[in-house]
């Protein structure tokens, strides 16, 4: 039987390994991109899988003062679409990371 000190060291090493894997996964998520669309592709927003906005593209046809309200709505809709996709990618990647750590599916890690 292992001594208490050996068990504590093993637990600390496991915690360090999990922390390292979580940090790597978070870094990976920031480098993965998703694209949200609205208005049939007239507005596009690129985000990292962590939700950081990388770029916005607006079709020239929307660049009219009379279209300001619609453009604002389309930008919000495109961001929300990108956010849903980013959350999906993030959940998938975190699931892979947790599976690699031997954690049960759906286990919520504190962040």
Image (cartoon, rainbow, N blue to C red):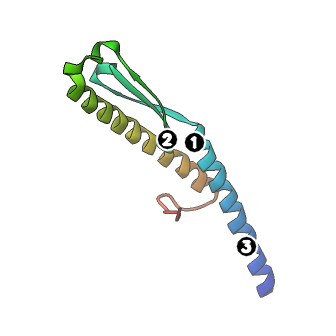
Of badges 3 and 2, nearer the viewer stands: 2
Q: Nearer the viewer, residue 21 or 50?
A: 50
Residue 67 placement (x, y as % from top left): 21, 21
Q: Nearer the viewer, residue 26 or 108?
A: 26
Residue 101 placement (x, y as % from top left): 64, 58
For residue 43, above or below residue 106: above
Of badges 2 and 1, nearer the viewer stands: 2
- Mark toward the start of the polypeptide (2 vs 1): 1
Mark number, residue 52? 2
Whether residue 68 sits left or right of residue 19 in the image: it is left
SS of the residue under disc 3: helix
Q: Residue at (21%, 29%) from the top-left corner?
A: 69
Q: Residue at (61%, 49%) from the top-left corner?
A: 25
- Mark toward the start of the polypeptide (1 vs 3): 3
SS of the residue under disc 1: helix
* Contact check, label 3 and label 2, Cβ < 8 Å: no
* Contact check, label 2 and label 1, Cβ < 8 Å: yes
Residue 42 placement (x, y as % from top left): 32, 19
């Amino acid at each position: 039987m292992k001594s208490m000190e050996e068990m504590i060291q093993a637990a600390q090493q496991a915690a360090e390994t999990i922390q390292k894997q979580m940090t790597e996964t978070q870094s990976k998520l920031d480098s993965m991109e998703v694209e949200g669309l609205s208005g049939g592709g007239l507005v596009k927003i690129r985000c990292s899988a962590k939700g950081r906005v990388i770029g916005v593209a607006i079709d020239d046809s929307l660049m009219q003062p009379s279209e300001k309200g619609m453009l604002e709505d389309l930008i919000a809709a495109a961001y929300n679409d990108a956010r849903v996709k980013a959350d999906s990618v993030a959940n998938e990647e975190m699931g892979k990371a947790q599976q690699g750590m031997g954690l049960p599916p759906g286990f919520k890690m504190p962040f």
